[in-house]
Amino acid sequence: MEKKEIHGSGDKWAEFLQSVFDLALENQGPERTAQLLNKLADRLRASQDGLPRGFNTPYVNTIPPEQQPPFPGDWQMERRIKSYIRWNAMAMVVKANSTTNVGGHISTYASAATLYEVGFNHFFRGRTENFPGDMVYFQGHAAPGIYARAFLEGRLDERHLQNFRQELADGGGLSSYPHPYLMPEFWQFPTVSMGLGPLLSIYQARFNRYLQARGLAKWTEEPKVWCFVGDGETDEPETLGSLTLASRENLDNLVWVVNCNLQRLDGPVRGNGKIIQELEAAFLGAGWNVIKVIWGSDWDDLLARDKSGLLLKRMEEAVDGDYQKYSVEPGSYTRRHFFGKHPELLELVNHLTDDQIRKLLRGGHDTRKVHAAYQAAMEHKGRPTVILAKTVKGYGLGEAGEGRNISHQQKKMNEKELREFRARFNIPISDDVIAETPFYRPPADSPETKYLLERRKTLGGFLPRRKVNPGSPGLDVPKPDYFAEFFKGSNTEVSTTMAFVRLVSVLLRDKSLSRNIVPIIPDEARTFGLDALFKDIGIYSSKGQLYEPVDSQSLLYYNEKKDGQILEEGITEAGSMSSFIAAGTSYATHGVPMIPFYIYYSMFGPQRVGDLFWLAGDIRAKGFLLGATSGRTTLNGEGLQHQDGHSLLHASTMPTLLAYDPAFAYEIAIIIAEGLRRMYAEGEEIFYYLSLYNENYAMPPMPAGVEDGILKGLYKFKSGADISQPGSAGVSPAHTKLAGGTPALPGLKAHIFGSGPIINSALKAQEILADRYGVSADVWSATSYKLLRTDALRCKRWNMLHPTAAPKKSYVETLLAKEQGVFVAVSDYMRLVPDQIAPWVPGGLMTLGTDGFGRSDTRARLRRFFEVDAESTVIATLYALAEKGLVEWQLVEKAIKDLGMNPEKVFPQIV
Ligand SMILES: Cc1ncc(C[n+]2csc(CCOP(=O)(O)OP(=O)(O)O)c2C)c(N)n1
Ligand SMILES: [Mg+2]
């Protein structure tokens, strides 16, 4: 083509460039052509500021019609099945809300029905003997549709559907959303806290690879992880935050389906833009394979006939707010506003009636388009795939909520709306009963039921299904005496973190258990002294180590390997928790019990990712969470953002979490041995939290007979000197004089509960009290206020409900019943932690704690500031005695002076 021929004409330029492009493609091949085009694009960008980077493809389906494989199913049959499921999903919500106000959602599933049904009929593989099953994260709000399918499959009956969201009804009901805790044989993955499902799915897919690399997975075929995501859900940072991990790890076992119905709860997701294009750019930039399913088959013909490119132009310029409007308005509106912009476009749809225009399908409602996308995702190698499917929220609800801004909250339908719904989807329900919204299940011998069951059989069985193989958790766990070295104590000063690290290295040498251990660290191995493990067991890396580490000469070099055991997650507590959850549920998802030990900066535990802790309970994860560098004053220097004095309170809110605050190495050994036994030998679906500290001190030997107390939460560690007789135990009854001449009662008794390193404040206070004030104080180690409280509550409640029976006594009440004197608690946590047991302590509990923001300073100053040092403990004990009239108030005042406490110092808690 001559240069002058094309001068001035836009179309000619396009043709010219197209012909050059075709030539290049033909002669140079796609890769070289792409390189050339990129070079040219770079030149263009360099010369013009502000040009877009070009992470978008045109606003049409990624798979053109000519590349669409033939649909292997019976399309009409699947439509009928889907319609029945749609009806039942709607009916269960409407029914539940006709008598109660328990809520529920219709419109999410209504928009996603095709996305799920294509999966169920053609792709999702069930669990078989040698295959764990595909792992499907269903959108939480689509749960009614998943139940409705299980009803058609015969897995649930009418009573279940009737009791949707009424779990406490006689005979039980169905949980509102996917909760394995509530329906442990059905749901596998909780997803309803937006953003967590997508995040977990990435780490699940990566964990599957980890198991495989370590030779622990027994499958013959690799399972796929499917995650269904709402387009509004992509606003959550957790949703998109780990995308690059999936591409970096080449997770082609992961498929996401983003249901782009353009709406969230309040209104449009991106009314002024296009969510599909925005997500495409993000996913392409993150290295994912992106498949857009925007237009249904009806549009193929229109696009093919659109020689001018105006249809595509119009598709690209209309924003999502416009598209939402087209879904609620009649066809005439779309004809006028969408096609009517250009006479050529009006002509393009001349042959269509308004009704036909209104029914032009979006891609996500077109079984064949969705199938083609899923097929392509299954076949894609090397990268994770995301399918961006365009749908209509509340599809099929008509005036009751289709495409309306109120759609998400719609849970009632009047009779007229029900009739319309029935007609649209051909549901065989007669007029006289329609107002009751009866469920509809085709007979067992109907072609629909046979088809549906045959499809599931071919795909390996029903799904979702959670299964724990009987006997599978039965690991050969070590008995407590395996940890004998920790019971002996040590004069060398060590921290509880160091003791824990030592314990893990002992376990890693245990023949029967070591393979199942999964150490997880978010970039803090050096902080906790776990870097010693790098060399021994290696850091998991799917690529091995492609470089020579700078520290290769050292003993503890940074050792990445393909079958490495440590999950070094980098700086992501959310990602690390996701790995904890994947590993901690492996006993159920894979039938391979794994023991995660996730150690992290305690402050960035439940405070940062509490929702994932909560989810770990729901999903029945097992394992050990280690909140290291804990304690508001023990982690000195770091200050306000790092010093944790409240995680144990968070931990108290988690129903299946056993939370401990151990002081000594032997306590850690006893707790972990018991945790291994309960979770991995007995199969209990619980998990453990231990706070660990970085203060070094000599670890005492374990006193005899304290194991039970350690596990229950409290035991006497060191009795006070016997000073009931004046002069005994070398202690003079100084208090009598000090108290201003009023003789105090002989045998002044106190009890101090200490936890973590702050037990040392209690021990030092014990000495001061005896030496200077004639008070004999017993020091107790309080390992778990949470467990003590739960046990006490259980007993009290039983007593209340059995008022004439012999009352039960809780552990803490039994333990303390025989003790005299006053009770004081001191810990590196806020007062509410020990306060949990105050109602059951005879005479009440005086608590000291670290309420308020932390400060950067030395431990000694911090402990004085928060009033948890030995001197503060002495003063509190004397005060408690004075309150009971056992010593004079003047004695307390004198102690304040003696011990250098400034009574006017600030109150660390702000409000
Ligand atoms: C963390 C969190 N925040 C808020 C909600 C409440 N919520 C439930 S569904 C929803 C809207 C969901 O919109 P989208 O993700 O687009 O899903 P759709 O129903 O449209 O498919 C919101 C805000 C939640 N479940 N989780
Ligand atoms: Mg949405």
Image (cartoon, rainbow, N blue to C red):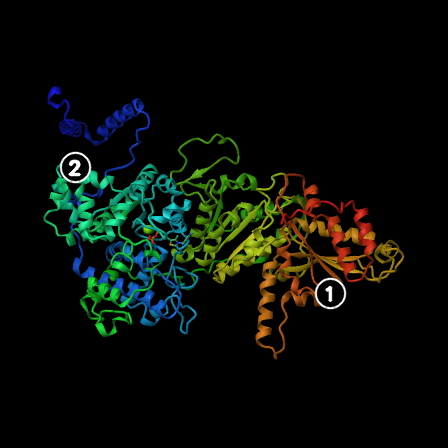
Q: Is residue 236 above or below residue 812?
A: above
Q: Is residue 868 left or right of residue 91?
A: right
Residue 860 drawn at (x, y percent): 70, 42
- The residue where tag 2 is placed is 309
In which quarter of the view is residue 18 placed? top left
Q: Which sits in the foreground, 155 or 404?
A: 404
Residue at figure coordinates x 50%, y 47% from the top left: 608
- The residue where tag 1 is placed is 819
Q: Quadrant of the N terminus?
A: top left
Q: Which sits in the foreground, 909 or 594?
A: 909
| Picture disc at residue 483 | none
Q: Secondary structure at mark 2?
A: loop
Q: Earlier in the sequence, mark 1 or mark 2?
A: 2
Q: Residues within 10 Å of mark 2 (few under 14, many from 20)?
A: few
Q: Which sits in the foreground, 319 or 743?
A: 319
Q: Residues within 10 Å of mark 1 (few under 14, many from 20)?
A: some
Q: Is residue 13 left or right of residue 646?
A: left
Residue 319 drawn at (x, y percent): 27, 43
Instruction: Say what amino acid the circle numbered 1 marks.
Output: Glu
Residue 123 drawn at (x, y percent): 26, 54
Q: Is residue 682 visible?
A: yes
Residue at figure coordinates x 18%, y 51% from the top left: 331
The mark lying in front, picked from 1 and 2, is 2
- Distance Cα–Cα, label 1 vs label 2: 89 Å
